[in-house]
Amino acid sequence: MKVLLLSDIHSNLAALETVVQDAEANFEIAETWVLGDLVGYGPRPAETLSLLSSIGAVAVAGNHDLAVAGVISAEAFNPVAAAAVSWTQSVLGNEYLDQLRALPTRLERHGITLVHGSPRDPVWEYVMNEGVAAQALDDVDTTGLAVGHTHVPVIFRQLSGEFERIQSASSQPRSVAGSKFLVNPGSVGQPRDHDPRAGYAVLDLDAETVTHRRVEYDHELTASKIREAGLPAFLADRLRVGV
Ligand code: ZN
């Protein structure tokens, strides 16, 4: 069974549409799991939520989703992120806000734990390095842990006492067989690893592999919608360089 792993879509509809088409064309996807930050930063929040519902995606909440839903305060956000939170609140109807409010911060599916940040702090903690990744794996009793939040794709694997970071490469399946593992699919809508292409991953639960993929999408379209919406220009500019 193959699972499409998406994270940090951030209302970037053009990126999401491209990713879903690419995944459907290349894999037999049985389920789609979203690791938070469905909205925030980007210009098409309602359309993004609607597309995710139409493909039956299961999602956990990210910090941006919770701020837009009014569950957490946007005070901890930088001014650009906070401006995007207010703008998103102003354009989303109650039905969508209720949908965001109902998202859990942690889920377990088919032996995999899903959180946005980390198991001990699903809202805010970044799993950026081996120390935090090892702690995060210790904090779950499932075989796999899928996280988002950093906007950077990565796989960590723990096998017979050895803990290692596995270099992901676009379209190359990486084995996690027999190990406890952590995967971050990277970001669909706002990559931050200096590669502007949209990122996602496919988890094959039978073959026990993770395949990261990067796809070109029309980032100029998203950038122009960001400017039209009156969102901070930095949010448009960063999409061109992937930071
Ligand atoms: Zn994010």
Image (cartoon, helix red, strand yellow):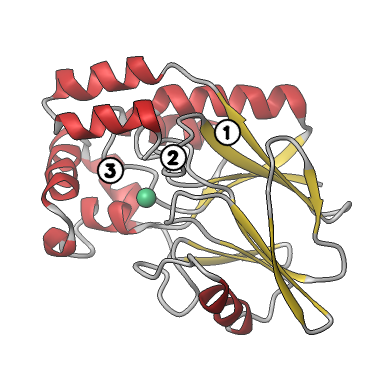
Q: Which of the two marks, 3 or 1, is nearer to us in this view? A: 3
Few, some or many residues within 10 Å of mark 3 (<14, 14–19, 20+)? many
Residue at 38% x, 30% y: name it: 241
Q: Quadrant of residue 189?
A: top left
Q: Disc 2, ligand 1: is the CB inside 8 Å?
A: no
Q: Is residue 78 above or below residue 164?
A: above
- Which element carries disc 2, helix, strand or loop? loop
Which label is found at residue 40?
A: 3
Disc 2 residue type? Answer: Pro
The residues tagged by marks 1 and 2 sit, at their Cα atoms, a distance apart of: 23 Å
Looking at the image, which residue is at 50% across and 75% down? 119
Q: Residue 55's mark? A: 1
- Does mark 1 have its CB less than 8 Å from ligand 1? no
Label 3 beta carbon less than 8 Å to ligand 1: yes
| Amino acid tagged 1 | Ile
Q: Secondary structure at mark 3?
A: loop
Alpha carbon distance from label 3 to label 1: 20 Å
98 and 210: which one is in front? Answer: 210
Q: Earlier in the sequence, mark 3 or mark 2?
A: 3
Work out whether mark 1 precedes mark 2 in sequence or the reverse, and give the earlier one: 1
On the rendered structure, is 168 left or right of 74?
right
Residue 192 in the image: state x and y as whole percent: 41, 44
Q: Categorize mark 1 by other alpha carbons within 10 Å: few (<14), some (14-19), many (20+).
A: few
Mark 2 lies on residue: 191
Instruction: Give the secondary structure at mark 1.
Output: loop
